[in-house]
Image (spheres, rainbow, N blue to C red):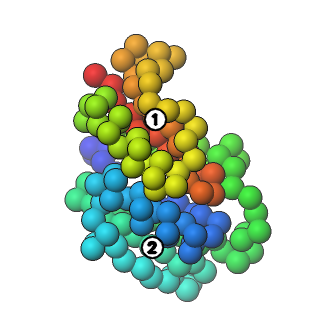
Amino acid sequence: MEPIIDHIQITVKDLNAAEAFYDRLMPVLGFDLQKKSKGRVPEHDFEVIEYYHPNFTFGINSPRNVFKEESIHRRKPGALHHLAFRAGSREEVDRIYPEIKAAGAMIVDEPKFYPQHGESYYALFFKDLQGIKYEIVYED
């Protein structure tokens, strides 16, 4: 098997607030909002919004009612620590940085080299409005 990701679904605390943010962010990352879909999975007690791209589908899910008051924390067992998107160049990381800020992301670390991850590791780190961490990375 070749390890290719088909889809990723992330549970957010507030689906409505998340949708407004991700509608601004996903086009910056190359997703077409015309291919966005919404649905409900009643047998698993969640709603889902999916953003389609030819490489993979990214979805955000509502929490189950029993968990909706819990806080998001990336260091909880089973939680997503962060998700990294690969850029095509350092210039691309720099170019999309202001667009990610304009989408309302909380910038954790601005674009720069992170030698602790490798001598040519250039990245930008940010969080969505609910604290889920993302990265845009280029490494040559």
Question: Where is residue 90 shown, x and y percent of the image?
Answer: 31, 29
On the question of residue 6 being in view, the answer is no
Q: Amino acid at mark 2?
A: Ile
Name above or below for residue 60 compared with residue 80: below
x and y, in percent, of residue 122 in the image = 40, 25
- Seen in the image, is 70 located left or right of residue 50? right
- The quarter holding residue 49 reads bottom left
Q: Work out which quarter of the rendered image holds the N terminus and state it.
A: top left
Q: Position of residue 51 (x, y in %)?
A: 36, 66
Q: Nearer the viewer, mark 2 or mark 1?
A: 1
Say which residue appears at 57% left-offset and 47% top-offset. 106
Q: How many marks?
A: 2
> Residue 49 has which mark?
2
Q: In the rendered view, would you say 125 is above or below 59? A: above
Residue beneath the point at 50% across and 63% down: 21
Q: Within the image, what quadrant is residue 30 found in?
A: bottom left
Q: Which residue is mark 1?
A: 124
Q: Residues within 10 Å of mark 2 (few under 14, many from 20)?
A: many
The residue sitting at 41% across, 44% down in the picture is 98
Q: What secondary structure is found at the residue carrying circle 2?
A: strand
SS of the residue under disc 1: strand
Question: Could you tell which of marks 2 and 1 lies nearer the N-terminus?
Answer: 2
Query: Can I make out residue 140 in this image?
Result: yes
Distance from Cα at disc 2 to Cα at disc 1: 25 Å
Which amino acid, mark 1?
A: Leu
* Residue 66: % across, % down: 74, 74
For the residues bearing labels 2 and 1, Cβ distance under 8 angstroms: no
Can you tell which quarter of the image residue 91 is in?
top left
Q: Residues within 10 Å of mark 1 (few under 14, many from 20)?
A: many
Residue with the most extreme left position: 54
For the C terminus, the image quarter is top left
